[in-house]
Amino acid sequence: MTPLRFRWLALVGLVAGLAAWLVNWLATRNGYGTPTLPLTSLVTTAAILCITLVFGRRVLQWRNGKRDRPLNPLLATRTLILAQACAYAGALSLGWHAGIFVDQLTLLSVRSTMAPLWGSVALMVGGILMIMVGLVVENFCRLPPDDDGTGAPGNTEGEYA
C-alpha cells in the first residue's frame, strides 16, 4: 500500500470545503437549515478514534519487539486501511465544516444564535483529531528500515507490517 499523501488529504478537504460553502449558501438563502452533522456525531468520532488507536497499539507493540506470537497479517492490513480511512474521513469532515463555518461567519450579523458556528468548530476539531490519529497509526504500521517482519534483518524501509 502507498502511504498517505498530504496533497490528497488537502485536496479532499478543499473540495469538501468548497462544496459545503456552496450547499450552505444555497440552503440558508432558501430557508433551509445548516447542513452540518449533529454534535452527537462526536461520540461516533471518539469511538472510531479509540478503535483505531487500540488496533494501532497492537501493531506497534509487535513492531517494537513484543513478538511472543506472530502478528496476523490481516489485522495489520486492516489496521493500516482503518488508519488511512480515518485520515480521509477527518479531512472530509474538516473541509465540510470549515466551508460551513466560513459561510456562517458572513451571516453572523443576521443570526440570533451562534450555535452553527460552535458546532462547526467542534466538528472541525474532530476532523483534525481524525487526521492526526490516522497519520500516527499509519506510522505505527510502518516497519523499521532493518526489519522484514520475520525478525531477520533486511532492507524494507517504508514497508508496512
Image (cartoon, rainbow, N blue to C red):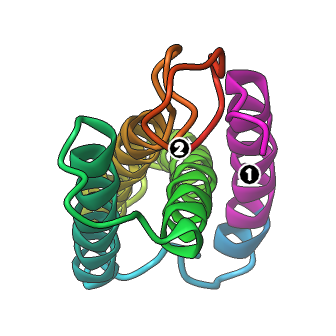
Location of residue 53 with respect to 32 vertically, above or below: above
Residue 46 locus on image (x, y percent): 23, 70
Q: Residue drawn at (76%, 44%), measured in percent from left and top?
A: 12
Task: Give the numbered dot on residue 16.
Answer: 1
Say if residue 126 shows up in the picture.
yes
Q: Residues within 10 Å of mark 2 (few under 14, many from 20)?
A: many
Q: Element at badge 2?
A: helix
At label 1, the amino acid type is: Ala
At label 2, the amino acid type is: Ala
Name the image quarter holding the N terminus: top right
Distance CA(mark 2)–CA(mark 1): 9 Å
Q: Which residues are magenta?
A: 1-25
What residue sits right under mark 2 in the picture?
A: 98
Q: From the viewer's perspective, tell me whether residue 77 is left or right of residue 51.
A: right
Q: Residue drawn at (18%, 48%), measured in percent from left and top?
A: 66
Task: Give the numbered dot on residue 105.
Answer: none
Main secondary structure found in the magenta portion = helix
Q: From the viewer's perspective, tell me whether residue 123 is left or right of residue 107.
A: left
Q: Nearer the viewer, residue 55 or 102?
A: 55
Q: Nearer the viewer, residue 98 or 10?
A: 10
Q: Residues within 10 Å of mark 1 (few under 14, many from 20)?
A: many
Location of residue 43 with respect to 80 vertically, above or below: below
